[in-house]
Image (spheres, grey):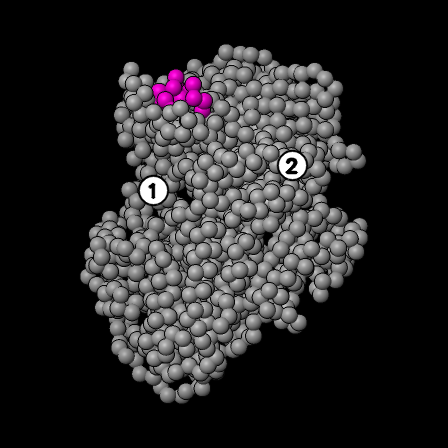
């Protein structure tokens, strides 16, 4: 819960810059939590960071130098990389490519999001063709040189780049994943140039389109992102912060500014990926390794799955149509949130989403000029949200406007009552949420019924119980800090860096010594990175993994080598088991190919559990009784409303009820039971299922 | 019949959403469990749900050229097995002449869904198999003259009877393929996907109740019908005519055409192919299911991308397809190529005709592919079949968007992902030399067509070449709204031992090591090129995809001396007349 007292030094701070709000979570030595919020400033995200720090300074009556001076770890999730891409505010990029292959970046392998929408153009290419310059030389598929790299071509290209004010250069030569020599030679030749992005360093995967695209996006964002982060880091350190800030990366791990400056493209999912840390925390408090998180904000829902304690990390990421081959937490995002718009199409069918009303004008009930009915308006009509000040007083909710929008745009066209229309909007939204969860679980071969659903984000706790019931989950877990899910998750994040090398071999015939030798350069990079971050001994771990597939397949599965030791028989067993789960079959005795080596470096941050809260047997009083439309079986019911601050561990009560928290509202249906667990979070039991 | 009045509009929306989700779920199971890379890479399959009469009610997931065609298969099943359909049965079929198939490689698994002893729906999956016997490995026999040269024909058959797999049928199909292991795995994946679908459909029907569920299915079809009727009603009444030429029959040049008349009568649309050329010798002839799908795809893609793609959408469409023509061939005409060519031609003919009726949505033609396959062996390794996808052609423009410079087949609306050359160098005995945009090949327009590509690859071993170069040597697309067609494709083989040769459009040949050079055709442009934004012309010239000469002659844009800006005054003069 949120404290009113002074924190006890030392503490950790997590700051997550979101689209609308910048969230801050402070956890002190005893494990007690403080949450602060301030509006984000998209044009200069550091202003949002300073604003939320100043809010803490005011509320805790601590000078900034003390707030930062007693902070041992400062985690930061920043949208600066993402926004640089979304707003097309990056630098002017020149690309050096192999002669004859200038256009893979623009051809994009023909990949389009929605094939039926053929009128939609590709997003603008980040390096125009006249700034994609050819370099002679060729490596073959095994990395052997067929023709030496032609550095004179680089000189010619540099003349063009100078004339065209190119600020940053990406180098992506054919087959460089197998041998970086040609890219290294180009880099050595350009050692004076400040911003170089080499594909073989940033994303040494096989596949020239994705590798080139990753290098180009990296080049495009690097000057702005690295500059911004260095400024923020030095500003905070000038104000008392002892240790460099740690940035959340797409892989769910943290890294220092200096370490990430070569690969800022790894920050694209910074923020959402911090949810992994939160899942680790809830796995301990809810005592299960199988969680599906549904983080619902204003416009979208991010679904993340933790199976047997592991959250999947892939090499595929798509940001606004640009493809990145960077290690990224698997997050499935759908357009379903509080601001999602409902509409009736011209042929008379109701739809909810994927379009959203955004922060401005927002839902109709905000009174900021929005006329399209949204999910938030439906909650108002159903009595689940209270009219008046909302989101810390930043808007005032008007239930008349909500009712009007749903009446005009939904109820009248469909010929039904306004309450029926509002309930219908919620049912359709919750169906979309259910489908999103099924998408990620069924595609990966998991049965969602074995999972506990974590309902997070400001809008998540309103829908957690209902979606859990449809999924067949026995329970929904609602974190008290649902609205600061990612900022809290950051405090439970390890340092992490991933390295990969494409390597083809046969699992059964490969010489173990040769394999270990091939791992060495990756392991050396991993160890150097950990050492630079100040980790050694037991707190520095380096995990080795193989990418494997049956011969003839085009996709691979990762299998870890426990303790780094290579035992082909054990690897086969592990591969077959995972193949069975993911694809439903195996090829007994089939040839297994190694396709890549991976090394993951982790610097382990101390695990500190939240401070246990003493159970309380005080019977809290409802702050109000409100008429709420609970579900289609029960219709309108008089429903008690509780203040979250009144509910303590040990509390348990059957629904229906509403719990109003600082950053969210929890809805408990008439068939559900709410409990507060020892970690001070909410657990909703569905239909009285066993916990 | 109108059932709308007694339906809950909220439940109707939920049912529509849920049926589409179920057909997508079937697709996820398919991509996850199938053996052949074709399903996860190319998505060459479609999952669909039909009502007990065989009307397709949902096909949310699938390749566009399968649009709305699955109903023919289910209706053939109902015709052949009336009174003999039981819970636990699974049916298999592929024949385009007798079983509602589209072409032989696409096999359909259809599973009846029962609730309380009543047939309530069919859960189905139509998927392209890796090999089905016939005259060439990999299902495409460019030299086929009869369907018997193309692989095994399957009537509607009960593959699983009341839960028991008929092993005789299973063995029959397994000995009729070159890749039994892949077929075995892929068939099991198809069967598994329909099982998941059937379970979910049964739950949905149980929730809705036997008394009501058909009304909701009908409500979904009626909504789709209303959606498309609005599109038709917006077109001025009248008859519109168009045609697409066919310049070869896979063996020699011909001068044939697909002719179409669109008759707009209020909310009703007639699609009449009377006057279309007779069926041809080669394997481009179309089946009823494929022609209907091509028409549906052409219509749906022209209007709203969000149009439902169930059979309700096309209730207002009447198709007339004379028998014995290339779009409705009589047996035993060969037809494996039809899902690409002649489907591409059907879509073109319909788009050209629609361009007269709805000029504001007009679409330029997409150039046709020039590539076939190279197959052979590398040393002791297993055989390979390589598609030369990296020579993909340029797409057509629409208002507001240039054509895609290199894109997969029109009949998938470009949904097929092109491979990386690095991947193909790992898989096949080849070395790529070039894959870059062409200069001055794009069809000119206010929005220009795609550029096509200059493509060059060295094949290091002797191998068999199956040529399917529909886009070679002649123009294969068209401009729209005053735009022009792109340049035709070209191909040349340069033998490592010496000498060169231009391959025919269609053939199967063996060659020793060689270098294959292709220039894939450019796509069609949209709108008057003299109205193209000069800034876009400048960018094209700087990018090297349009020459300075063409900028002046075709686009009426003069650049400054250093080529970095537009000479506004000279451009105004060039564009004044």
Of tags 1 and 2, which is closer to the observer?
2
Residue A68 visible in the displayed image:
yes
Quarter location, residue B36:
top right
Quarter placement of the N terminus of chain B: top left
**Residue A502 in picture, x, y percent from top left:** 67, 48
**Residue B222 in picture, x, y percent from top left:** 34, 41
| Count of numbered labels shown in the rendering | 2
Q: Label 1 marks which chain's residue?
A: B
Residue A479 visible in the displayed image:
no
As drawn, A236 above or below B143: below
What kind of element bears circle 2? loop
Q: Residue at x 21, y 63 (%)?
A: A398
| Magenta highlight range | B546-559
In reply to whether residue B151 is colored magenta, the answer given is no
Disc ID at residue B223: 1
As drawn, B134 above or below B62: above
Q: Which residue is mark 2?
A: A149
Q: Residue at x 36, y 68 (%)?
A: A52
In depth, the one of B342 and B331 nearer the eye is: B342
Q: Residue at x 24, y 48 (%)?
A: A413
Neighbor class of circle 1 (other Cα within 10 Å; few <14, some 14-19, many 20+) is many
């Amino acid at each position: 819960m949120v404290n009113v007292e002074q924190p006890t030094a030392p503490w950790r701070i997590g700051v997550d810059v979101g689209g609308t709000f910048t969230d801050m979570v402070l956890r002190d030595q005893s494990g007690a939590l403080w949450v602060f919020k301030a509006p984000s400033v998209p044009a200069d995200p550091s202003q949002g960071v300073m604003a939320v720090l100043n809010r803490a300074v005011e509320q805790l009556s601590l000078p900034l130098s003390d707030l930062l001076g007693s902070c041992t770890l400062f985690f930061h999730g920043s949208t600066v990389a993402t926004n640089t891409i979304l707003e097309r505010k990056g630098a002017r990029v020149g690309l050096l490519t192999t002669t004859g292959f200038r256009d893979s970046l623009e051809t994009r392998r023909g990949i389009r999001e929605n094939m039926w929408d053929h009128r939609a153009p590709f997003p603008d290419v980040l390096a125009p063709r006249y700034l994609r310059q050819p370099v002679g030389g060729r490596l073959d598929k095994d990395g052997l040189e067929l023709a030496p790299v032609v550095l004179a071509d680089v000189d010619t290209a540099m003349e063009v780049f100078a004339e065209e004010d190119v600020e940053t250069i990406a180098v992506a030569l054919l087959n460089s994943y197998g041998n970086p020599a040609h890219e290294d030679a180009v880099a050595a030749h350009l050692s004076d140039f400040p911003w170089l992005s080499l594909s073989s360093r940033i994303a040494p995967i096989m596949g020239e389109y994705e590798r080139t695209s990753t290098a180009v996006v990296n080049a495009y964002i690097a000057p702005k992102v690295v500059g911004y982060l260095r400024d923020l880091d030095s500003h905070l350190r000038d104000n008392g912060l002892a240790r460099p800030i740690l940035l959340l990366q797409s892989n769910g791990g943290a890294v220092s500014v200096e370490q990430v400056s070569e690969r800022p493209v790894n920050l694209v999912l910074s923020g959402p990926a911090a949810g992994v840390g939160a899942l680790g925390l809830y796995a301990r408090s809810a005592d299960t390794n199988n969680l599906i998180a549904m983080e619902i904000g204003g416009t979208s829902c991010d679904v993340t799955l933790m199976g047997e304690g592991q959250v999947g990390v892939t090499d595929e990421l798509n940001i606004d149509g640009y493809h990145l081959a960077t290690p990224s937490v698997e997050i499935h995002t759908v357009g379903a949130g509080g601001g999602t718009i409902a509409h009736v199409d011209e042929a008379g069918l109701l739809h909810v989403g994927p379009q959203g009303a955004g922060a401005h004008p927002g839902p109709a009930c905000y009174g900021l000029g929005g006329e399209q009915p949204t999910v938030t308006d439906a909650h108002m009509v159903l009595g689940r949200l209270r009219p008046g000040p909302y989101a810390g007083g930043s808007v005032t909710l008007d239930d008349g406007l909500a009712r009007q929008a749903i009446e005009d745009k939904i109820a009248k066209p469909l010929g039904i009552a306004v309450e029926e229309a509002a309930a219908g909007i919620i049912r359709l939204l919750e169906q979309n949420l259910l489908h999103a969860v099924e998408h990620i679980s069924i595609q990966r071969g998991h049965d969602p019924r074995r999972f506990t659903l974590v309902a997070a984000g400001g809008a998540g706790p309103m829908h957690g119980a209902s979606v859990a019931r449809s999924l067949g989950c026995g329970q929904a877990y609602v974190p008290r800090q649902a609205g600061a899910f990612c900022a809290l998750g950051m405090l439970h994040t390890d340092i992490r860096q991933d390295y990969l090398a494409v390597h083809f071999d046969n699992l059964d015939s490969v010489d173990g010594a040769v394999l270990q030798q091939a791992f060495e350069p990756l392991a050396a990079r991993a160890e150097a990175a950990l050492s630079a971050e100040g980790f050694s001994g037991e707190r520095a771990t380096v995990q080795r993994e193989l990418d494997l597939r049956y011969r003839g397949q085009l996709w691979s599965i990762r299998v870890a080598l426990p303790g780094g030791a290579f035992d082909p028989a054990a690897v086969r067993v592990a591969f077959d088991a995972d193949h069975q789960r993911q694809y439903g079959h195996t090829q007994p005795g089939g040839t297994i190919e190694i396709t890549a080596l991976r090394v993951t470096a982790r610097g382990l941050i101390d695990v500190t559990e939240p401070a246990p809260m003493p159970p309380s047997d005080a019977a809290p009083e409802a702050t109000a009784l409100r008429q709420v439309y609970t579900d289609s079986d029960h219709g309108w019911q008089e429903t008690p409303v509780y203040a979250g601050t009144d509910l303590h561990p040990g509390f348990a009560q059957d629904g229906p009820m509403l719990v109003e928290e600082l950053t969210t509202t929890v809805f408990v249906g008439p068939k559900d039971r709410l409990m507060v667990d020892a970690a001070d979070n909410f657990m909703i039991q569905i239909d009285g299922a066993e916990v | 019949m109108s059932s709308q009045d007694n339906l809950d509009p909220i439940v109707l929306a939920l049912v529509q959403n849920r049926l589409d989700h179920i057909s997508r779920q079937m697709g996820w199971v398919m991509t996850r469990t199938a053996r052949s890379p074709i399903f996860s890479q190319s998505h060459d399959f479609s999952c669909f749900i039909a009502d007990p009469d065989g009307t397709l009610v949902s096909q949310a997931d699938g390749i566009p050229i399968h649009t709305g065609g699955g109903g023919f298969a289910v209706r053939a099943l109902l015709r052949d097995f009336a009174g003999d359909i039981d819970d636990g049965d699974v049916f298999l079929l592929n024949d385009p002449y007798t079983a509602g198939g589209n072409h032989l490689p696409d096999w359909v698994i259809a599973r009846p869904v029962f609730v309380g002893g009543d047939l309530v729906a069919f859960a189905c999956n139509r998927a392209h198999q890796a090999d089905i016997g016939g005259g060439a490995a990999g299902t495409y026999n460019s030299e086929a003259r009869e369907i018997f040269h193309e692989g095994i024909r399957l009537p509607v058959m009960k593959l699983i009877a009341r839960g028991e797999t008929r092993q005789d049928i299973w063995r029959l199909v397994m000995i009729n393929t070159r890749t039994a292991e892949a077929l075995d795995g892929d068939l099991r994946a198809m069967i598994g996907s329909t099982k998941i679908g059937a379970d979910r459909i049964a739950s949905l029907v149980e929730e809705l109740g036997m008394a009501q569920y058909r009304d909701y299915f009908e409500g979904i079809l009626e909504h789709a019908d209303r959606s498309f009727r609005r599109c038709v009603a917006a077109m001025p009444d009248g008859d519109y005519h168009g045609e697409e030429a066919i310049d070869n029959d896979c063996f020699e040049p011909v001068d044939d055409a697909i002719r179409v008349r669109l008759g707009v009568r209020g909310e009703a649309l007639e699609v009449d192919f009377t006057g279309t050329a007779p069926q041809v010798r080669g394997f481009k002839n179309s089946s009823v299911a494929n022609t209907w799908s091509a028409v549906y795809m052409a219509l749906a893609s022209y209007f709203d991308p969000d149009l439902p793609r169930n059979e309700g959408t096309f209730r207002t469409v009447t198709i007339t397809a004379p028998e014995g023509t290339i779009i409705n061939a009589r047996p035993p005409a060969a037809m494996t190529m039809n899902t690409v060519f002649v489907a591409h031609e059907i879509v073109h003919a319909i788009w050209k005709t629609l361009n007269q009726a709805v000029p504001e949505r007009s679409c330029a033609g997409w150039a046709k592919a020039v590539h076939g396959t190279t197959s052979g062996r590398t040393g002791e390794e297993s055989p390979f079949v390589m598609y030369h996808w990296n020579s993909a052609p340029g797409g057509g423009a629409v208002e507001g968007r240039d054509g895609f410079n290199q894109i997969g087949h029109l009949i998938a609306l470009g949904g097929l992902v092109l491979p990386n050359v690095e991947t193909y160098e790992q898989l096949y005995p080849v070395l790529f030399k070039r894959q870059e945009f062409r200069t001055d090949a794009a069809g000119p327009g206010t929005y220009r067509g795609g550029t096509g590509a200059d493509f060059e690859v060295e094949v290091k071993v002797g191998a068999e070449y199956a040529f399917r170069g529909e886009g070679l040597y002649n123009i294969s697309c068209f401009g729209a709204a005053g735009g022009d067609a792109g340049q035709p494709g070209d191909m040349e083989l340069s033998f490592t031992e010496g000498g060169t040769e231009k391959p025919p459009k269609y053939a199967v040949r063996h060659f020793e090591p060689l270098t294959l050079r292709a220039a894939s055709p450019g796509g069609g442009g949209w709108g008057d090129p003299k109205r193209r934004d000069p800034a876009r012309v400048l960018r094209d010239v700087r990018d090297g995809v349009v020459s300075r000469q063409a900028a002046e002659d075709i686009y009426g844009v003069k650049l400054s001396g250093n080529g970095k800006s537009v000479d506004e005054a000279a451009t105004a003069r060039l564009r004044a007349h």
